[in-house]
Amino acid sequence: MRVREGHREMIPVTGSARMFLFRRPADMRKGFDGLSGMVEEHFPENLFSGALFIFLNRRRDRVKILYWDRDGLALWHKRLERGKFQMPANKEGTSAELTTAELSMLLEGITPLRVNQRYRLGEARAATG
């Protein structure tokens, strides 16, 4: 499945894809090599795992998402004309794992005041068995 709203069809999001947000401002001049080095230094996940690595600049008006796409690295970049991307408030540390919903809210500019995730029977069974 891919995030479907408009231009975000290009970002591959599967049920098993992990998404990591770099919580410090990133230098948006960095490309594939510079961001790859940041992934190796600051994230727990392997660069080639298929995970999405999300970077924001200091003003939070630009986002870059780096990921491995079957046969090479891909880089998605967006610059807002107005407004800012909102950092999820309940995350701590240098990097934080996001859910698909949190990534969608980040890209849409939605700031959740409180997150109450519903109980999911499948997750409870997986955790116990």
Image (spheres, rainbow, N blue to C red):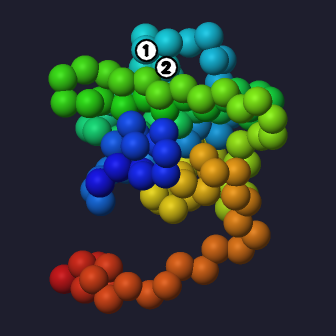
Quadrant assignment for the C terminus: bottom left
Q: Name which residue type carries label 1.
A: Phe
Specify whether 63 is left or right of 61: left
Asked which quadrant contains residue 58, the reply is top right
- On the image, the x and y values in percent for residue 64 come to 55, 28
Asked which quadrant contains residue 57, the reply is top right
Q: Are marks 2 and 1 in contact (CB under 8 Å)?
A: yes
Quadrant assignment for the N terminus: bottom left
Callout 2 secondary element: helix
Which residue is rendered at x = 63% and y = 18% of the image? 28
Which residue is rendered at x = 38% and y = 85% of the image? 120
- On the image, the x and y values in percent for residue 112 come to 70, 66
Quickly name the residue at label 1.
Answer: 32
Does any portion of residue 37 appear in the rendered image? no
> Viewer-proximal residue, 124 or 69?
69
Does 120 appear above or below 59? below
Asked which quadrant contains residue 89, the reply is bottom right
